[in-house]
Structure formats: C-alpha cells, structure tokens
Amino acid sequence: MKALICFHDHGDWWFSKSLRWGFRHVFVVVWDERGYWVRLDGMKGVPKATVEAGDDDLAGYYRREHGFTVIEVQIERRERLPFLMVGTCVGMAKAFLGIRAPWVITPYQFYRYLRSSYG
C-alpha cells in the first residue's frame, strides 16, 4: 500500500500545545487503486475519510503549499493490531496503516518510528 504520512502544527486536542512544534497532528493519505488519494484523518478521535486528489505529487503539494512534514512509505505487511488502540491521531494512523508500535503515542515519536523503520 502506497501511503503518505503528514505531520503538521494544527493539533486540536487540549494537550497539543505541549507537543513538539511541527508534530502536533498526523494524518494518513493512501493511494486508492482507482487512482485517487484518500485522506484518513483522526482529528479529535473522530475518524474521517475524504478524497483528496488524483495528483501523483500530493506529497510535494503538502510540503510546498502547507509546509507539512511528509513521509512517503510503501507498507507491504500489516501487523495484527492490539485489542485496544488509543483514540488519538497517532493511534488512528497506526491502525489505518496496520502498524503495531504500542509505545509510540505522540506524532513526533511516530515520525521517528517511521524514519527508522521505513527509511
């Protein structure tokens, strides 16, 4: 599965101000086999899916136009998820991607995990 993981400063939880600048929220955009990018966002613990675009350079658009930190990944395997997941943007992003990393709870920790695991 081809996916973009996007980090930015627009976190909306009460504790967002205590998180690292540039890593206050995360959302995932996955490539649909029909030729569209689908955004999967867990803002305030509520999952939301929207069609973003059919553009091949959506990562570049997010970087240039919005200043987001974007990691492009190819997820080949999906891990068995734990019974309980934290209902935050990070918990939802991990669930969408099938990533099991129970001690990764903040967007910056998730960024570091992805950089070390997926390059």
Image (cartoon, grey):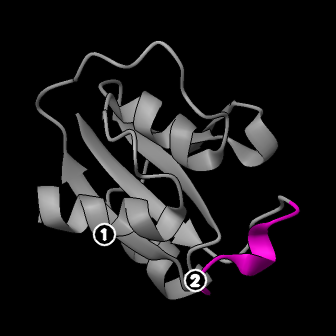
- Is 17 on the left or on the right of 119, as rendered? right
- 84 and 99: which is toward the camera: 84
- 74 and 37: which is toward the camera: 74
Task: Indicate the amino acid at tag 2.
Answer: Gly
Q: Which mark is residue 22?
A: 2
What is the magenta range? 14-21
* Place of residue 30 in the rendered image (x, y in percent of width and height, measured from the top left): 39, 39
Main SS of residues in magenta: loop
Above or below — where is 8 with respect to 86? Answer: below
Task: Indicate the amino acid at tag 1.
Answer: Arg
Residue 58 appears in view: no
- Is 48 on the left or on the right of 26, as rendered? right
Q: Which mark is residue 112?
A: 1
Give the residue displayed 40% in from the left and 59% down from the top: 110
Residue 16 in magenta stretch = yes
Which quadrant would the C terminus be assigned to in this image? Answer: bottom left
Residue 13 appears in view: yes
- Is 98 on the left or on the right of 10, as rendered? left
Give the residue displayed 47% in from the left and 12% down from the top: 83
Cα separation between marks 1 and 2:
13 Å
Above or below — where is 10 with respect to 41? Answer: below
